[in-house]
Amino acid sequence: MLPFTHAILDDDGEVIRKHRWSHREAKWFTDNNPHVIIVKLPKEIRVRENLYELVGECLF
């Protein structure tokens, strides 16, 4: 499943809802709802440790 890219915040800065939006979709939503606070979420870096362990043994 695709990771969440944007979040809508309430007045206290708490996340109300997360969305999977492209840059264009987020801009459209912001233009149509200027009173809503939207932030871009950081990308999660997934490390496949099991794969690295297997490959590491072959390299050394």
Image (cartoon, rainbow, N blue to C red):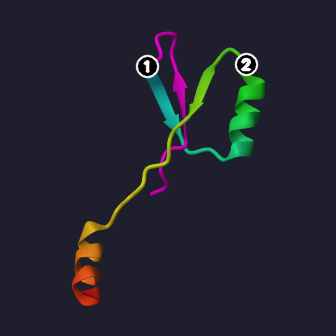
Magenta region = 1-14
- Residue 32 is situated, as x and y percent measured from the top left of the image, at 76, 25
Assess disc 1: are there few (<14), some (14-19) or many (≥20) residues with their C-alpha within 10 Å of its C-alpha. Answer: few
The amino acid type of the residue labelled 2 equals Pro
The majority secondary structure of the magenta stretch comes to loop
**Closer to the camera in the image, 40 or 36:** 40
Residue at 32% over, 67% down: 48
Q: Quick one: SS at disc 1?
A: loop
Residue at 49% over, 55% down: 2
Left or right of 32 in this view: 20: left
Quarter of the figure with residue 49: bottom left
Residue at 38% over, 58% down: 46
Of all residues shown, which one is farthest toward the top?
11
Residue at 68% over, 37% down: 26
In the image, is residue 25 above or below residue 49? above
The amino acid type of the residue labelled 1 equals Glu
- Residue 7 is situated, as x and y percent measured from the top left of the image, at 53, 32
The disc label shown at residue 34, or none = 2
The disc label shown at residue 28, or none = none
Q: Which residue is mark 1?
A: 14
Q: Quick one: SS at disc 2?
A: loop
Placement of the N terminus among the 4 image quadrants: bottom left
Q: Which mark is first along the chain, 1 or 2?
A: 1
